[in-house]
Amino acid sequence: MLDFTFYNPTKILFGKGQIAGIAQEIPQDQRILITYGGGSIKRNGVYDQVMAALAGRTVFEFAGIEPNPTYETLMEAVRIARERNIDFLLAVGGGSVIDGTKFIAAAVPFPGEPWDILARHAPIQKALPLGSVLTLPATGSEMNSGSVVTRRATQDKLAFMHPLVQPRFSVLDPSTTFTLPPRQIGNGVVDAYTHIMEQYLTYPVNSPIQDRFAEGLLLTLIEEGPKALATPEDYDVRANIMWCATLALNGLIGAGVPGDWATHMIGHEITVLHGLDHAQTLAIVLPSVLAVKRDKKRAKLLQYAARVWGLTDGGEEERIDAAIAKTRDFFERMGVRTYLRDYGIGSDAVPTLVAQLERHKLTRLGEHGDIDLATSRTILERCVAA
Amino acid sequence: MLDFTFYNPTKILFGKGQIAGIAQEIPQDQRILITYGGGSIKRNGVYDQVMAALAGRTVFEFAGIEPNPTYETLMEAVRIARERNIDFLLAVGGGSVIDGTKFIAAAVPFPGEPWDILARHAPIQKALPLGSVLTLPATGSEMNSGSVVTRRATQDKLAFMHPLVQPRFSVLDPSTTFTLPPRQIGNGVVDAYTHIMEQYLTYPVNSPIQDRFAEGLLLTLIEEGPKALATPEDYDVRANIMWCATLALNGLIGAGVPGDWATHMIGHEITVLHGLDHAQTLAIVLPSVLAVKRDKKRAKLLQYAARVWGLTDGGEEERIDAAIAKTRDFFERMGVRTYLRDYGIGSDAVPTLVAQLERHKLTRLGEHGDIDLATSRTILERCVAA
């Protein structure tokens, strides 16, 4: 096991009706800004539950945080938060709303140009406190300190992490996810699955606990994911997926093991340049990363094949190929297509994507830092079509 | 899955040499009281590492916290902490030292008789902050808010839990465990194993994540436990056991599932009346609880048999018997005897133990609250001998 620091102070309120609990979590005298997305929370009753819980409080609203939240939109919220002397941010939505709200939290008291937080890793000295009401299980943002923000003007999708922007609390009520469209459920499961793979599918460091936790989460997603599509109002299924997605990226399974994250870095560029959903890019890139890095990932690929997919017969290459095929097939069954061609993108897009990686200095990706631009090109070429 | 609240703000510093990190975790100006046990930390270098990390700080010491820490000893530490205006407690040792230090933390600012915290669940308004340097993986106290304290004078072993006494940080350096005697390693593994079983071996609530995490921890202890006895200085083995013991009782695997805890409650009375090590009592009582409650625990016992012990052939009773026998055998292989007779205690002890349970109002134990005194008597009678 590698050395690690693990610190995760987000309080999780899990279960039906838990939104009422936010009243106890936000100090009485705080001026609250509720942030959300396109307004689905007004149709599914979540907005009303939040407002009921905060009755009598000083509450402002900021709507319109989009998927892959943009600097341009978020800076508008920063302006309002400053103008209204907001004390506490409450993100109500999925990972994009929470990620965006983390950026707002850091940007409001930031003395300089907030984009530097992302572009120059400018140090954060303080941030507004925030909490979240999660309505889309996927990114894990509800229980970690990371945030990814896109700047439309410059086609940059960049990340920052800071303990000060970790949610103080997050409400996970699985019944709030009943009304999600299938595309968002499929995306969420693929996103969580890939988060697990980024931390599991590297090389062995004698970490049986982390391995078994990761495998347990993968198996649960494989079992429960298709059920979530088939029977949208099955509470237990939604509960298991929701808790899975949180545990997939709250630091636990990544503590003491190497991380890959090449799939995410390459995927970000596809989203920025071609507008694909985040999870769509992961479903496209992950199988290719596994195939191209099969030698250095061999031991873990064989373990994954055996423990997650029950593949124990045949030669090593055969088992690895089968495990990658099963992974791709699972993503497809979740309704997420796994080739660039499925989204109308051809091999002519590859050079621009590689150039974008170069521009972002993403030239040493993966758990060994050995995915250079040539390797990324090979990976992307495999992403185009079968 | 059941509803739950999960909140665990302890920061874990894991790895060799991490004791140096406590300097950053304790504010510079604090008056620190270091609490420890019998002095093994002076022989294995841990004391020196702690003192080096705190060089230049105002540090006091309280030694002599015994296994199953007593109110009598701890109140002496409370007196010293008050006298010296201590701001921060640093527990250096195993679960007993940490449990005892939690009581000290709550007792120092407590306005009344601190025993009421245990005996009458008197409300705790404040507590001294504390951190820990763990040297014995076993109880999980390093990452939870629970504490068990014994009062010698009245033969009471009672527990309390409060978020204010949860360690701010805990250092887990596996190399500090190299010099532990085999008895403490065996006890630690049995203690952690039983903590997992108390939260896993109940009845199904459709919680595949919690189940697989629990099974992953059990499998890891079964694999790594005997290695820890055979090759005491294998860092990875000690690291895996240490992290297992912490995760066994930090709230994670218990979130959203029922808990049993009958084994612990019955075991406490055996320790108080007969002086057995805590883990010895668990090794004795757990197999009998599983055997006596086999009908209500049937589904989970069969899952445990299959997933943890690979027992899939034969009838249900046969598989359950085999799983219980394997559990007992594992404890014995860890050097912990599993019958009262092995410790010179006969069936004549049973009525007094039952009377003690009655005196402590422990008349509705287990995940269904259906282990009454008659059932506890049956369990204890099975504990005497094969």
Image (tube, coloured by chain):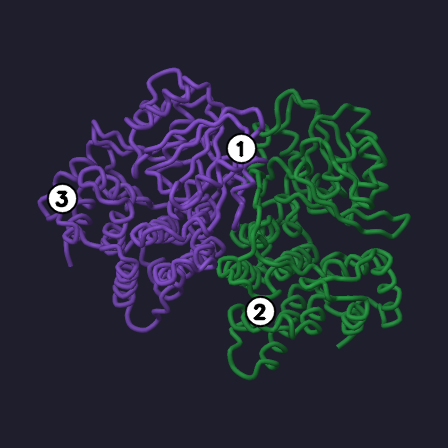
Chain colours: A purple, B green
Q: Where in the figure is residue B120, as x and y percent of width and height?
A: 82, 44
Disc 1 residue type (three-letter): Ala
- Disc 3: which residue: A350
Frontmost of labels 1 and 3 is 1
Task: Report the quarter where the C terminus of chain B lies.
Answer: bottom right
Considering depth in this image, is B118 or A208 the residue closer to the camera? Answer: B118
Residue lying furthest top: A111
Mark on residue B300? 2
Q: Secondary structure at mark 3?
A: helix
Q: CA distance from mark 1 to mark 2?
A: 44 Å
The reply to whether callout 1 and callout 3 are in contact (CB within 8 Å) is no
Q: Where in the figure is residue B336, as x and y percent of width and height?
A: 70, 64
Disc 2 residue type (three-letter): Lys
Q: Where in the figure is residue A93, as x and y percent of width and height?
A: 40, 40
Frontmost of labels 1 and 2 is 1
> At 67% from the left edge and 23% from the top edge, which residue is drawn?
B30
**Residues behind callouts 1 and 3 on a single chain:** yes
Q: CA distance from mark 1 to mark 3?
A: 52 Å
Q: How many numbered circles are shown? A: 3
Residue B209 visible in the current orientation: yes
- Disc 1: which residue: A55
Relative to B87, residue A188 above or below: below
> At 38% from the left edge and 62% from the top edge, which residue is drawn?
A231
